[in-house]
Image (spheres, rainbow, N blue to C red):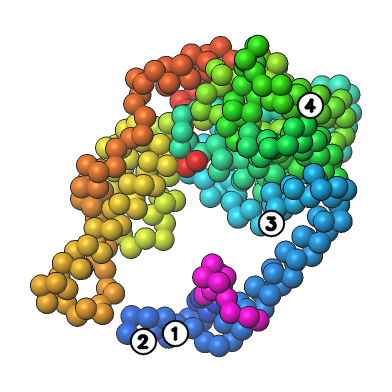
Amino acid sequence: MSVLHIAEAAKVIGWARSHYLSSTVLPSIEGERLTIPRESLDLAIERLKEQVTKSKNLSQNLKNLAKDEYERDFISSVVPPDEIGVKFDDIGALEDVKRTLDELVALPMRRPELFSHGNLLRPCKGVLLFGPPGTGKTLLAKALATEAGANFISITGSTLTSKWFGDAEKLTKALFSFASRLAPVIIFVDEVDSLLGARGGALEHEATRKMRNEFMAAWDGLRSKENQRILILGATNRPFDLDDAVIRRLPRRIYVGLPDAENRKKILKILLAKENLESDFKFDELANVTEGYSGSDLKNLCIASAYRPVQELLEEEKKGRVSSNSTHLRPLVLDDFIQAKAKVSPSISHNATSMNELRKWNEQYGEDGSRTKSPFGFGN
């Protein structure tokens, strides 16, 4: 194998470390560093080779599936389910949302034969995830594709735009025709309001209007083909900007809001699972003092906190109290997070205008469960 990229080397070291620790009772440690045997490294390198080969084969298969230059534009956007790298178990909290998505999307894609009888048990063709920034909508979309065993295509408004007049329509048509040969597939439309927002009337550009009309027509074509396992999954912070016709095509609208204390605790435990913490770290106390933080905010807080032991070590080096090549860091303590909290604040206020608009929209259009249960979320 040729020289590894940093990301590939990190994978090899991680796999080799896991293999070695799982196959030995007393691991070899020299100077506080784990010594990984050649056997474990060789196995990890073989695993990487297999992954690279599989990826090349997939790329070739996708090229064979693409019928024209417009469909080929989407090849790099396709992520197979076993390469997404996120599962529902990796997401803190959001249990009700995950359960709903599993029933609505993952189950029909995994077991289509259960949904082929009658008129009521039909796979959902449109789901909307809405809520404030940083609450886990993108992470949920990726995990859902993994759980459903579906290919994942992520697009934004810019994906379907082109400097050439008329190409946006062709790209839109190509997206759906290519997806039909990749099924099961989830087409994730991030910031769906920017692509399918309310019509701009006389001021709307003709190319934008034609692209939107082509998207809606192709979407309607999906809805008429019950056996085609393709889902449009939209995500937005501004659902109130969506066109009414789009809202009708997204019959399941799930609010992903800010986490409460119990769910902040779950998120923090996942974020800090591999960190060196003091033995009696007080997760409950940290969860209670981070009211209003989204999952993304909590991640930023944890990163800022992790720098404090590093900064202390560098200060000790300057004063000559420790060796300049020392890498031993003290465990993280609750005070690190309290101090970091002064620098990392919640990204959105509970009483912000946008939050009030989201709550109002949820009351009018959201899922029943969203309106009656405490909202929570993680990471975007």
Residue underneath mark 4: 214
In the rendered structure, which amino acid carries the disc numbered 2?
Answer: Glu
Reply above or below: 181 against 358: below
In the displayed structure image, the side of residue 225 where residue 358 appears, left or right: left
Q: Which residues are magenta?
A: 1-14
Task: State yes or no: discs 2 and 1 in contact (Cβ < 8 Å).
Answer: yes
In this rendering, which labeled residue sits more in front, label 1 or label 4? 4
In the displayed structure image, the side of residue 277 where residue 142 appears, left or right: right
Res 188 visible = no
In this rendering, which labeled residue sits more in front, label 3 or label 2? 3
- Numbered tag placed on residue 30 in the rendering: 2
In the displayed structure image, the side of residue 58 where residue 100 appears, left or right: left
Return the residue nearer the eye: 374 or 311.
311
Q: CA distance from mark 2 to mark 1?
A: 7 Å
Reply above or below: 265 against 236: below
Residue underneath mark 1: 35
Reply above or below: 179 against 354: below
Residue underneath mark 3: 82
Q: CA distance from mark 3 to mark 4?
A: 31 Å
Label 1 sits on a secondary structure element that is loop
Q: Residue at x 43, y 31 (%)?
A: 258
Q: Position of residue 53 (x, y in %)?
A: 74, 70
Q: Earlier in the sequence, mark 3 or mark 2?
A: 2
Q: Earlier in the sequence, mark 4 or mark 2?
A: 2
Q: CA distance from mark 1 to mark 3?
A: 30 Å
Q: For the residue carrying disc 4, how many other residues have a C-alpha within 10 Å: few (<14), some (14-19), or many (20+)? A: some
